[in-house]
Image (tube, rainbow, N blue to C red):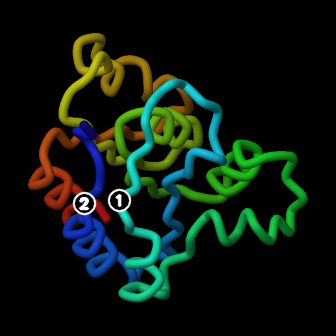
Amino acid sequence: PPISYFSIEILDYLISILKDKYTIVYNRPKTKDIVNDNSIVKDLNEYDWLRSKHPEVILIQDLFEKNEIKANNFNHFQLCLYANCSHFISVHGGTATLASYFGGKNIIYSQKGGEHYFKCFEKLYPQLSGAEIIHAKTENELMGFVTKLY
């Protein structure tokens, strides 16, 4: 089952405290948008919730559907978007790794995984671009880091 993910309650908290200071682009790729790595992508039903509860949040899928920059594929589009960002809040896995390539700050929510054992959040990820990596192991840590740093 999913371990590290943003629940609706966490999303609501993050958006509520950040929406007046930042333009928020929500990026949780759908299965059709990413390379299959044999991981099961669970539907958290957050897209419809975001559209109704927080219409100010931009969904990356909506931007990609328009694809005004003529990106070759979804990954190319993500790279172009991330190149214009300096503050990231990401979840353990590919999204956290990708966001770490673009400098700025990346608060990564990860409860457990191989990255913990190998200390990737301390040793590897900061070397990808010099980004400041902040590792939140619990939802409370995540909320605290976001409140304090953003």
> The N terminus is located in which quarter?
top left
Q: Nearer the viewer, residue 58 or 35?
A: 35
Residue 102's x, y, as percent? Answer: 58, 42
Q: Label 1 is placed on what type of residue?
A: Leu
The mark found on residue 82 in the picture is none
Q: Label 2 is placed on what type of residue?
A: Ser
Q: How many marks overall?
A: 2
Is 139 above or below relative to 8?
Answer: above
- Mark closer to the observer (2, 1): 1
Question: Going 35% across and 59% down the picture, which residue do you hit?
Answer: 44
The mark found on residue 44 in the picture is 1
**Residue extending furthest toward the right:** 70
Which residue in the structure is indicated by mark 2?
A: 7
Residue 75's x, y, as percent? Answer: 70, 43
Res 138 quadrant in image = top left
Residue 83's x, y, as percent? Answer: 67, 51
**Residue extending furthest toward the left:** 140
Q: Residues within 10 Å of mark 1 (few under 14, many from 20)?
A: few
The answer to whether 34 appears left or right of 52 in the picture is: right
Local SS, label 2:
loop
Question: Going 38% across and 68% down the picture, which residue do you hit?
Answer: 46
Res 20 quadrant in image = bottom left
